[in-house]
Image (cartoon, rainbow, N blue to C red):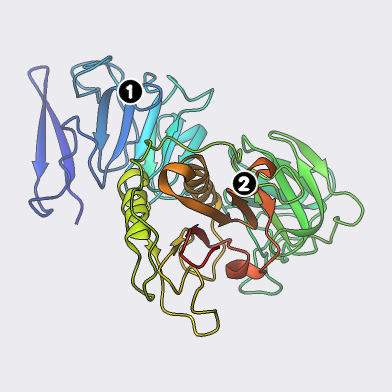
Amino acid sequence: MSKRLIFVAIAGALLSVFVATAPANAATARNGVCEAGEFCLYFNSDQAGSVSDFDTSISDYGDSQPSCYDFKSAGNGQGVCVKNNAAAVWNRMGSSVTVFFNSGYGGTSQTIGAGAKANLKAGLKNENASHRVGSPADARDGVCDDDEFCLYYNSDQAGSVSDFDTSVANYGDSQPSCYDFKSAGNGQGVCVKNNAASVWNRTSKPVTVYFNSNYGGTNQTIAAGGKANLKAGLKNENASHRIGDSGGGSPDPDPGDPGPYPTPPENTNPEQAVRAPNASARTAFVRTQIADLTGERQCYVGDYRPGEPSTSNHNTGNALDCTISNAIGQYPNASQEAQGWKLANWLKQHAVRLDVRYVIWDGKIWSVARASEGWRTYTAGGGVTGGHYDHVHVSMQNPYGD
């Protein structure tokens, strides 16, 4: 059970009273240390300066001392009220957290995925008043809010609206399981798939609408903030959309962004072949660095694969699959996809130090042998798992070659 923070103002001083229902080793919110299970705001960008740590949603940070939530730890900004003074965040909770411009969870917002670090975007940096743990509650309510992507039943943003705050790989074909148009108006209750005529992109990223499920076929990209009628071939012929996609299946975020993760130590373990599910010493080293430096802990060699050669990277304990989506076989949401790219690009950036040979993620592959070509389209597998949309694959060199 989560602890609750009870703040009581007595004689102008703020007393923090903790109701201790969590285990003794649980995070201690409001102590200025960003611990596992907390959401943390920083006075400076890049998780620098004084930190203010929370374990619950806060609907109003407060405007002045002694009653406001302030930055706790030593460093630049210590003692300053959090409201309108935060520049960066680290979400160490197990669910997403959304920061809002207004108190009461309103106005411009930015959602930070579980485990992620981020600088607050323009319009929220030093303009923040509240945060809420969990996915934004307003999505799928039939109102096209800030930071949502919205599909309309009629052209020119008319008729019933269907609002989203994540990418959707397949709108679904029939009720009651399909994504439908939510608001009052023409088309209310109709499935979105093959029935949308126009869009409004209120997110801060480009969004691409696709003819096929799983982000395939004819597509149209709508710039951040843009409104558009779907073009011929997509109007009433739409099956999926991806936030942060600039068209042609390009990934989100910028493929060159390795995220905020530290530089790993050098992998000095020699080549070795073992039998899956055991990991070679070289692979075990990489798995440890991934867990310690990026926070991604769902990385496995996996069981021995009879359908593959005994000398394959997986079967010799020289490959890892790191689950990114909620489960193997499921497409990631937008924040999970961004997290996958941070991991994949960190592995790419430090491939020499880690002795990584190639990385596969989100339908793309990068290899040391063809590094000058950057991320290439992966063609050796299809579907959510075969195309590596649900997990990041990382291979080391094994004694039998790649």
Q: Nearer the viewer, residue 183 or 145?
A: 145
On the rendered structure, is 172 left or right of 210?
left
- Residue that carries the numbered disc 1 in the rendered image: 48
- Residue that carries the numbered disc 2 in the rendered image: 143
In this view, the mark in front (2 or 1): 1
On the rendered structure, is 28 left or right of 270?
left
Kindly give the residue lying farthest to the bottom in the view shown: 306
Q: Quadrant of residue 329?
A: bottom right
* Image vertical order of residue 240 relative to residue 178, above or below: above
What's the residue type where badge 1 is placed?
A: Ala
> Answer yes or no: do the residues labelled 2 and 1 have beta carbons within 8 Å?
no
On the rendered structure, is 100 left or right of 245?
left
**Label 2 environment density (alpha carbons within 10 Å; few <14, some 14–19, many ≥20):** some
Residue under the image location 53 percent in, 47 percent down: 341
User: For numbered disc 1, what is the local secondary structure?
Assistant: strand
User: For numbered disc 2, what is the local secondary structure?
Assistant: loop
2 or 1: tag closer to the N-terminus: 1
Q: Quadrant of residue 122?
A: top right
Numbered marks: total: 2
Horizontal and vertical percent position of residue 369 = 61, 50
Horizontal and vertical percent position of residue 86 = 37, 23
What's the residue type where badge 2 is placed?
A: Val
Q: Where does the C terminus fall, quadrant-wise? A: bottom right
Residue under the image location 58 percent in, 39 percent down: 147
Horizontal and vertical percent position of residue 98 = 43, 40
